[in-house]
Structure formats: structure tokens, C-alpha cells
Amino acid sequence: MRPRRHLTIDQQHLAIVRLQTGCSQMEVATELRVSQSVISRLQQRYRETGRVTERHRSGHPLATSHTDDRFIVNNALRNRMMNATQLQARLREVRGTQVSRQTIRNHLHQHGLRARRPARVPDHTTRHRCHCLAWAREHLRWTRDQWASSLCPCMNNTGLISSSWTTMLQLIEVASLGNGCWRLGYLKWSGLHFVQTCIP
């Protein structure tokens, strides 16, 4: 993993504490996953100014205030599915602050928040649904005791899930929705629950 080039305020304070307790720059850099030069510049700045924040520099003023920064981070933490475009619109709507999407990403990265793609699962195709429907009709009159000791072969035979998952599944619901439609519900012991409607 490539080392980061920037530290958050909390990480900067932590780095100074580590240095003051006798840790070397390399040890602190390794712990915080940054290059040694980052720690060296931080220590030099602290010796000269007594602060970990960067010196005032001329140039373009910051686009956001500290309150705006907290607003961005808090909204990202409350709703992990929001992307930079949505956060940008939310900031403009609530705070009246107009910034670019890259600015949003930069603030999130400074707080250790990075984009993640949701995991994908195999599609439940029409063939899978029809196979499950046929299997459910064959076992419609089963008792609770029969279900308790059964597997769900319709899920395994269609290749929808691996055989190792088969023992984790239990058919918990077979209910007629009317007009020849059937609703199948499956429960994974870890708590995953999904429902599929099949139309013959």
C-alpha cells in the first residue's frame, strides 16, 4: 500500500506525542503509514511554531470553513452510500457553500473516508426463480419439523449459491400472492434475508 502524503489533525498530534516519548521518525512514519519526510517536516514545524498546523500561506483562500468540513464528514458517515456529487449538492442546499466534487473528495480523504464499491452477488435469473417455484410447490405441505432438518436444493442445484451455504439456509416462507404468483423467502443464519417473487 502506498504511504499517504497527509495526516489529519489528530494524527499530527499523535505523531508529536510519539516523538516526544522517544520514538524515532521512522517508527512514527511506519505506524501512521506515511513517509519519513512527512514526519520530519511536521517535527520541524512544531519546533519552530509550537503548533502542528501548517503556517499561513498566501494564495487562493480555502473554499470551505471548519463548519463546512464537519458537515461534509458527518453526512458521509451518516449515509455511507452518498457519493461526492450528492454531498456537493447537500452542502450547497443546506450551507449555501459551492465547491467542486474534488474538494469534497479531498476533505473525505483527509478524514480517512474513501470510496468503496458494494459487493456484487449472482443474479437470480428467471430459470432460478422457476426452479425454486417448482421445488416450493413440491414441498408446500411440509411440516415445521420437516423444514427444520431440510436443506434447500433449489438454491444449490441452480448454482445460485455454493454448496457450503446450503446448510446455512432454511426455507421460511411459501405464501400464495394470488393470480398464480408465489413468494419465496430465505433466511441465512447470520441474518441475511432476501425475498424473491416468482410468476409462473
Image (cartoon, rainbow, N blue to C red):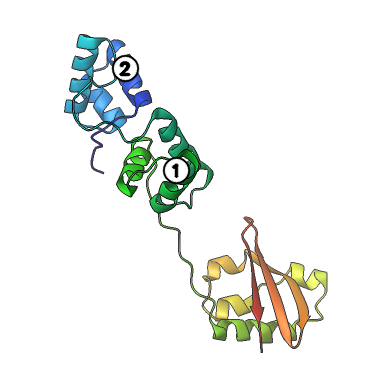
Secondary-structure class at tag 1 = helix
Q: Is residue 24 above or below residue 126?
A: above
Task: Answer with mark 1 or mark 2, whichever residue precedes in sequence.
Answer: 2
Q: Which residue is mark 1?
A: 91
Q: Is residue 150 above or below residue 189?
A: below
Q: Is residue 113 above or below residue 85?
A: above
Residue at 31% x, 23% y is 12
For label 1, count other residues whose C-alpha is less than 10 Å away and answer few (under 14), some (14-19) or many (20+). many
Question: Can you give x and y, in whole percent of width and height, for residue 41 in the image?
Answer: 18, 21
Camera-side residue: 102 or 196?
A: 102
Q: Amino acid at mark 1?
A: Leu
Q: Quadrant of the N terminus?
A: top left
Mark 1 or mark 2: which is in front? 1
Above or below for 154 versus 195: below
Residue 73 at what x, y percent from top left?
A: 44, 38
Q: Mark 2 sits on what residue?
A: 18
The residue at the point 34 percent across, 40 percent down is: 109
User: For the residue marked with disc 2, what is the amino acid?
Assistant: Arg
